Image (cartoon, rainbow, N blue to C red):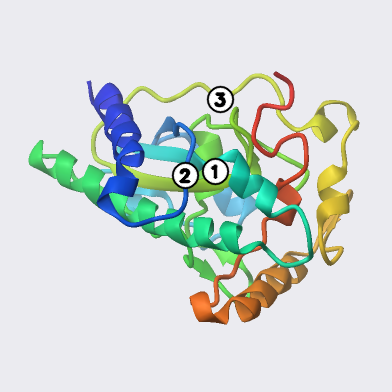
Amino acid sequence: MFKERIEGLIDDYVNKYQGRRSVMTKWRKPLVGFASAEDQLFEELKEVIGPSHALPEDLLAGARSIITYFLPFEEAIIESNIKGENSSKKWVVAYRETNQLIHDLNQHIKAELNTLGQEVKTVSATGNFFEDELISEWSHKHVAYIAGLGTFGLHKMLITSKGSAGRIGSLVVDFESPPTDRPEEEYCLYKVDGSCTQCVARCVNGSLQENAFDRHGCYDACLSNGEVYSDMGSPEVCGKCTVNVPCSDRNPIR
Protein backbone atom coordinates (compact mmCIF):
# COMPACT_ATOMS: atom_id res chain seq x y z
CA MET A 1 0.00 0.00 0.00
CA PHE A 2 2.68 2.51 1.04
CA LYS A 3 4.80 1.76 -2.03
CA GLU A 4 2.07 2.74 -4.49
CA ARG A 5 1.03 5.70 -2.35
CA ILE A 6 4.56 7.07 -2.19
CA GLU A 7 5.20 6.58 -5.91
CA GLY A 8 1.98 8.47 -6.62
CA LEU A 9 2.87 11.26 -4.15
CA ILE A 10 6.27 11.80 -5.76
CA ASP A 11 5.01 11.72 -9.33
CA ASP A 12 2.11 14.08 -8.61
CA TYR A 13 4.22 16.54 -6.60
CA VAL A 14 6.90 16.83 -9.28
CA ASN A 15 4.28 17.24 -12.02
CA LYS A 16 2.62 20.09 -10.16
CA TYR A 17 5.74 21.73 -8.73
CA GLN A 18 5.86 24.54 -11.27
CA GLY A 19 2.40 25.52 -10.11
CA ARG A 20 3.54 25.58 -6.47
CA ARG A 21 6.73 27.59 -7.04
CA SER A 22 7.98 29.88 -9.77
CA VAL A 23 10.71 27.68 -11.27
CA MET A 24 12.38 27.42 -14.66
CA THR A 25 13.39 23.78 -14.43
CA LYS A 26 11.46 20.91 -15.96
CA TRP A 27 11.89 17.29 -15.04
CA ARG A 28 11.04 14.02 -16.68
CA LYS A 29 9.06 11.33 -14.83
CA PRO A 30 10.76 10.43 -11.53
CA LEU A 31 12.14 7.01 -10.71
CA VAL A 32 11.40 5.66 -7.23
CA GLY A 33 13.16 2.85 -5.37
CA PHE A 34 12.95 1.22 -1.96
CA ALA A 35 15.56 -0.52 0.19
CA SER A 36 15.43 -2.47 3.43
CA ALA A 37 17.17 -0.76 6.34
CA GLU A 38 18.67 -4.17 7.11
CA ASP A 39 20.32 -4.56 3.71
CA GLN A 40 23.92 -5.65 4.32
CA LEU A 41 25.14 -3.12 1.74
CA PHE A 42 24.55 -0.32 4.26
CA GLU A 43 27.19 -1.86 6.51
CA GLU A 44 29.50 -2.19 3.51
CA LEU A 45 29.18 1.54 2.81
CA LYS A 46 31.26 2.13 5.91
CA GLU A 47 34.07 0.27 4.15
CA VAL A 48 33.48 1.80 0.70
CA ILE A 49 32.94 5.43 1.78
CA GLY A 50 34.23 5.55 5.33
CA PRO A 51 33.26 4.75 8.92
CA SER A 52 31.53 8.12 9.26
CA HIS A 53 28.77 7.12 6.80
CA ALA A 54 25.53 6.74 8.72
CA LEU A 55 23.40 3.62 8.92
CA PRO A 56 19.63 4.02 8.56
CA GLU A 57 19.13 3.49 12.28
CA ASP A 58 21.62 6.26 13.00
CA LEU A 59 19.21 8.66 11.33
CA LEU A 60 15.95 7.18 12.60
CA ALA A 61 15.44 4.86 15.54
CA GLY A 62 13.34 1.95 14.36
CA ALA A 63 14.25 2.48 10.70
CA ARG A 64 12.77 -0.21 8.46
CA SER A 65 12.98 1.10 4.91
CA ILE A 66 14.61 3.78 2.76
CA ILE A 67 12.80 5.62 -0.02
CA THR A 68 14.92 7.03 -2.83
CA TYR A 69 14.02 8.84 -6.02
CA PHE A 70 15.80 10.18 -9.08
CA LEU A 71 14.60 13.40 -10.71
CA PRO A 72 15.87 13.39 -14.33
CA PHE A 73 16.42 16.74 -16.01
CA GLU A 74 14.70 17.51 -19.28
CA GLU A 75 16.78 17.28 -22.46
CA ALA A 76 17.20 21.07 -22.86
CA ILE A 77 18.97 21.32 -19.48
CA ILE A 78 21.34 18.50 -20.37
CA GLU A 79 22.18 20.01 -23.76
CA SER A 80 22.81 23.44 -22.23
CA ASN A 81 25.73 22.11 -20.18
CA ILE A 82 27.72 20.61 -23.08
CA LYS A 83 29.77 23.59 -24.22
CA GLY A 84 32.46 25.41 -22.25
CA GLU A 85 34.40 24.56 -19.10
CA ASN A 86 31.95 26.19 -16.71
CA SER A 87 28.49 24.89 -16.01
CA SER A 88 25.72 26.55 -17.99
CA LYS A 89 23.40 28.92 -16.18
CA LYS A 90 20.47 26.63 -17.02
CA TRP A 91 22.30 23.70 -15.39
CA VAL A 92 23.09 25.76 -12.29
CA VAL A 93 19.47 26.89 -12.02
CA ALA A 94 18.32 23.28 -12.37
CA TYR A 95 20.74 22.20 -9.65
CA ARG A 96 19.50 24.86 -7.24
CA GLU A 97 15.82 24.43 -8.03
CA THR A 98 16.00 20.65 -7.83
CA ASN A 99 17.67 20.82 -4.43
CA GLN A 100 14.77 22.99 -3.29
CA LEU A 101 12.31 20.57 -4.89
CA ILE A 102 13.90 17.68 -2.99
CA HIS A 103 13.56 19.59 0.28
CA ASP A 104 9.94 20.50 -0.41
CA LEU A 105 9.05 17.02 -1.66
CA ASN A 106 10.63 15.35 1.35
CA GLN A 107 8.63 17.60 3.69
CA HIS A 108 5.47 16.80 1.73
CA ILE A 109 6.07 13.05 1.98
CA LYS A 110 6.93 13.36 5.67
CA ALA A 111 3.73 15.29 6.41
CA GLU A 112 1.61 12.77 4.50
CA LEU A 113 3.18 9.79 6.26
CA ASN A 114 3.05 11.47 9.68
CA THR A 115 -0.73 11.73 9.32
CA LEU A 116 -0.73 7.94 8.95
CA GLY A 117 1.29 7.52 12.14
CA GLN A 118 4.60 6.84 10.40
CA GLU A 119 7.95 8.36 11.39
CA VAL A 120 10.20 9.84 8.71
CA LYS A 121 13.73 11.24 8.69
CA THR A 122 14.60 13.53 5.79
CA VAL A 123 18.12 14.26 4.57
CA SER A 124 19.38 17.39 2.83
CA ALA A 125 19.95 17.03 -0.92
CA THR A 126 23.43 18.53 -0.67
CA GLY A 127 26.07 19.67 1.77
CA ASN A 128 25.99 16.58 3.99
CA PHE A 129 29.68 15.74 3.70
CA PHE A 130 32.98 16.37 5.49
CA GLU A 131 34.89 18.98 3.47
CA ASP A 132 38.38 17.91 4.51
CA GLU A 133 37.93 14.34 3.32
CA LEU A 134 35.03 14.97 0.91
CA ILE A 135 33.26 11.95 2.35
CA SER A 136 29.49 11.89 2.71
CA GLU A 137 27.67 11.37 5.97
CA TRP A 138 24.81 10.00 3.86
CA SER A 139 25.46 9.36 0.17
CA HIS A 140 22.20 9.64 -1.75
CA LYS A 141 23.69 8.01 -4.86
CA HIS A 142 24.96 4.98 -2.95
CA VAL A 143 21.66 4.65 -1.12
CA ALA A 144 19.87 4.86 -4.48
CA TYR A 145 22.10 2.07 -5.78
CA ILE A 146 21.11 -0.11 -2.83
CA ALA A 147 17.47 0.70 -3.61
CA GLY A 148 17.83 -0.55 -7.17
CA LEU A 149 17.74 2.74 -9.07
CA GLY A 150 20.81 2.03 -11.18
CA THR A 151 24.49 1.13 -11.40
CA PHE A 152 27.63 3.22 -11.07
CA GLY A 153 29.42 4.56 -14.11
CA LEU A 154 33.10 5.17 -14.74
CA HIS A 155 32.37 8.80 -13.81
CA LYS A 156 31.38 7.70 -10.27
CA MET A 157 27.81 8.85 -10.82
CA LEU A 158 24.73 6.66 -10.63
CA ILE A 159 23.34 5.71 -14.04
CA THR A 160 19.62 5.00 -13.93
CA SER A 161 17.28 3.76 -16.63
CA LYS A 162 16.75 7.47 -17.36
CA GLY A 163 20.43 8.33 -17.37
CA SER A 164 22.67 10.14 -14.91
CA ALA A 165 21.71 13.79 -15.47
CA GLY A 166 19.47 14.68 -12.56
CA ARG A 167 19.32 14.76 -8.77
CA ILE A 168 18.65 12.15 -6.09
CA GLY A 169 16.67 12.42 -2.87
CA SER A 170 16.12 9.94 -0.06
CA LEU A 171 14.25 9.45 3.21
CA VAL A 172 14.35 6.92 6.04
CA VAL A 173 11.02 5.55 7.33
CA ASP A 174 9.86 3.31 10.14
CA PHE A 175 7.69 0.97 8.08
CA GLU A 176 8.62 -1.93 5.87
CA SER A 177 8.14 -1.74 2.12
CA PRO A 178 9.22 -4.45 -0.34
CA PRO A 179 12.72 -3.56 -1.61
CA THR A 180 13.26 -2.80 -5.28
CA ASP A 181 15.30 -5.39 -7.14
CA ARG A 182 18.71 -4.15 -8.17
CA PRO A 183 19.41 -4.25 -11.93
CA GLU A 184 21.02 -7.45 -13.14
CA GLU A 185 22.55 -5.69 -16.14
CA GLU A 186 25.34 -3.11 -16.10
CA TYR A 187 24.37 0.37 -17.35
CA CYS A 188 27.90 1.73 -17.86
CA LEU A 189 29.27 0.85 -21.30
CA TYR A 190 32.84 1.00 -20.01
CA LYS A 191 32.01 -1.64 -17.43
CA VAL A 192 30.13 -3.74 -19.99
CA ASP A 193 32.92 -4.06 -22.54
CA GLY A 194 35.29 -1.11 -22.19
CA SER A 195 33.74 0.57 -25.23
CA CYS A 196 33.14 4.03 -23.73
CA THR A 197 35.35 6.50 -21.87
CA GLN A 198 33.58 9.64 -23.04
CA CYS A 199 33.02 10.88 -19.48
CA VAL A 200 36.81 10.93 -18.99
CA ALA A 201 37.21 13.13 -22.05
CA ARG A 202 34.42 15.39 -20.77
CA CYS A 203 36.13 16.09 -17.42
CA VAL A 204 37.24 19.74 -17.49
CA ASN A 205 40.39 19.44 -15.36
CA GLY A 206 41.53 15.83 -15.70
CA SER A 207 40.30 14.76 -12.28
CA LEU A 208 38.54 11.78 -13.82
CA GLN A 209 40.77 9.19 -15.47
CA GLU A 210 40.11 5.69 -16.69
CA ASN A 211 41.95 4.17 -13.74
CA ALA A 212 41.91 7.00 -11.21
CA PHE A 213 39.72 9.70 -9.69
CA ASP A 214 40.88 12.80 -7.83
CA ARG A 215 37.88 13.78 -5.70
CA HIS A 216 39.58 16.98 -4.53
CA GLY A 217 40.27 18.04 -8.12
CA CYS A 218 36.64 17.33 -8.97
CA TYR A 219 35.54 19.47 -6.03
CA ASP A 220 37.84 22.25 -7.24
CA ALA A 221 35.92 22.31 -10.52
CA CYS A 222 32.68 22.62 -8.56
CA LEU A 223 34.11 25.44 -6.44
CA SER A 224 35.23 27.22 -9.61
CA ASN A 225 31.64 27.28 -10.82
CA GLY A 226 30.61 28.57 -7.43
CA GLU A 227 32.86 31.56 -8.01
CA VAL A 228 31.49 32.14 -11.51
CA TYR A 229 27.93 32.05 -10.18
CA SER A 230 28.55 33.78 -6.86
CA ASP A 231 25.47 35.92 -7.49
CA MET A 232 23.41 32.70 -7.37
CA GLY A 233 24.62 31.58 -3.98
CA SER A 234 27.95 30.10 -5.12
CA PRO A 235 26.57 26.69 -6.20
CA GLU A 236 29.19 23.94 -5.99
CA VAL A 237 28.25 22.09 -9.16
CA CYS A 238 29.74 20.94 -12.47
CA GLY A 239 28.06 17.99 -14.23
CA LYS A 240 30.21 18.11 -17.37
CA CYS A 241 30.99 14.38 -17.25
CA THR A 242 27.27 13.51 -17.25
CA VAL A 243 26.31 15.38 -20.44
CA ASN A 244 26.98 14.60 -24.11
CA VAL A 245 27.76 11.00 -23.15
CA PRO A 246 25.73 7.82 -23.85
CA CYS A 247 24.44 7.66 -20.28
CA SER A 248 23.30 11.28 -20.05
CA ASP A 249 19.55 10.84 -20.31
CA ARG A 250 18.82 7.28 -21.23
CA ASN A 251 19.71 3.69 -20.46
CA PRO A 252 22.74 3.24 -22.73
CA ILE A 253 21.99 -0.43 -23.31
CA ARG A 254 18.34 0.04 -24.15
Task: Name the kind of residue labelled 1 in the image.
Answer: Phe
Q: Nearer the viewer, mark 3 or mark 2?
A: 2
Whether 119 is drawn above or below 39: the answer is below
Indicate which disc residue 182 carries. 3
Task: Give the image location of residue 85, x and y in percent.
Answer: 78, 65
Residue annotated with mark 2: 26
Q: CA distance from mark 2 to mark 1?
A: 6 Å
Residue at 87% x, 42% y: name it. 197
Secondary structure beneath dot 1 equals loop
Task: Name the kind of residue labelled 2 in the image.
Answer: Lys
Residue at 72% x, 46% y: name it. 243
Task: Give the image location of residue 67, x and y in percent.
Answer: 37, 38
Secondary structure beneath dot 3 equals loop
Q: Nearer the viewer, mark 3 or mark 1?
A: 1
Task: Name the kind of residue labelled 3 in the image.
Answer: Arg
Q: Nearer the viewer, mark 2 or mark 1?
A: 2
